[in-house]
Amino acid sequence: MNTHPTSTSTPSAVPPGMPLVSVVIATRDRPELLRRAVRAALGQDYAGPVECVVVFDQTPPDTSLATDRGPGTSTGDLARRPARSIRVIGNTRTPGLAGARNSGIDAAAGELVAFCDDDDEWLPDKLRLQVAQLSATGADVAVSGIEVHYEDRVITRVPSTADVVAVAIARHRVMEAHPSTVLVRAEALRDRIGLVDEKIPGSYGEDFDWILRAAQSGPIAVVERPLVKVLWGSQSYFSDRWATIIEAIDYGLAKHQVLRTDPVAQARQQGRKAFAYAAIGDRRSALRWARHTLRLNPRDPRAYAAIAVALRFVSADRAMRLANSAGRGI
């Protein structure tokens, strides 16, 4: 896909201690949710400049987003806030979420880079608190807590610093450290940590892969407050792609030693694999991988969920809805 850059005026000189933040939002066919995400990114109370890089994946870029004011803002708002800009581009890399995020990173001009999913929404103080936390700690990466919005429920999930070390992430995923909470120094992103892995089948779990690599690269700072609204009601992208999920799990196990050598971490991956086999109706494989999982960690809930689905006590969709209603995934 060709790149179609369109922008507002370039942010003016960066105030001392207030670096330019580039917000990368990859999107595909969710225009109303996207505009809300962009509006929240531009509406931050952070005193420094912010550019929003919107990357359209496998769909024509909507250049109407790149207005002088930004969507949903007034002339008065514009006069009171620091420099804000929007750029709209196409995904010039591998089709899919990983390639789209990397296209945005390639285009980002900021000293700091943040990610936001197109169906999530930042709270107004996110960047201000996270930039301050990076400055105070010297870390390369900062995350925060989230509010999981699922149907009529709101579940608050907030990680601690101990939750975002490599072993804890490998064992528990720590979905509180959601990609929409990530703020990272551009130099570390492009060098020490690396870009999003475009080889992951279907881009499934690219966020887990990246945050695991980030934790292995150095300490992750945490703002122990929910600063992002995560909208789970719209997240059904992978529910019918179980074969791809199995491939992605195997890819991750081969790539990350900690997922193979730590019993709890390995059990988590095998339990997810068992559930995926159960979801596609492969009962024998589901039960086999569930047994492997329980040998490693008898407390892993995914193995029991996989057995229940394989034996048709509950459907895979129902099991996923129950997990989502508690603010968790499979």
Image (cartoon, rainbow, N blue to C red):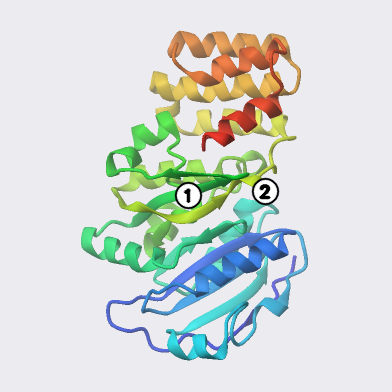
Is residue 306 toward the left or the right of residue 256 in the image?
right
Q: Which mark is residue 234?
A: 2
State whether residue 91 appears in this view: no
Residue 279 in the image: x percent, y percent?
71, 23
Residues at circles 1 and 2 in contact by the CB criterion of under 8 Å: no
Please state, as top left, top right, bottom left or bottom right, where the C terminus lies in the image.
top right
Query: Could you tell me how far apart the alpha carbons at marks 1 and 2 are, in whole angstroms?
Result: 15 Å
User: The disc labelled 2 sits on which kind of residue?
Assistant: Ser
Label 1 packing within 10 angstroms: few (<14), some (14-19), many (20+): many
Q: Residue at x 28, y 82 (%)?
A: 16
Q: Earlier in the sequence, mark 1 or mark 2?
A: 1
Residue 230 in the image: x percent, y percent?
54, 51
Q: Which residue is mark 1?
A: 147
Find numbered disc 2 in the image and state the secondary structure of the residue it sits on: helix
User: The disc labelled 1 sits on which kind of residue?
Assistant: Glu
Q: Give above or below for 294 relative to 248.
A: above
The count of marks equals 2
Please state, as top left, top right, bottom left or bottom right, where the N terminus lies in the image.
bottom right
Find the residue positioned furthest to the left. 136
Find numbered disc 1 in the image and state the secondary structure of the residue it sits on: strand
Q: Which mark is residue 204?
A: none
Is residue 5 toward the left or the right of residue 301 in the image?
right
Find the residue positioned furthest to the front. 152
Q: Residue at x 46, y 85 (%)?
A: 83
Is residue 326 toward the left or the right of residue 54 in the image?
left
Q: Give above or below for 125 relative to 169.
A: below
Q: Quadrant of residue 4?
A: bottom right
Q: Residue at x 39, y 66 (%)?
A: 125
Residue nearest the viewer, comparing 325 with 202: 325
Q: Quadrant of residue 72?
A: bottom right
Residue 67 in the image: x percent, y percent?
64, 84
Q: Give above or below for 195 relative to 131.
A: above
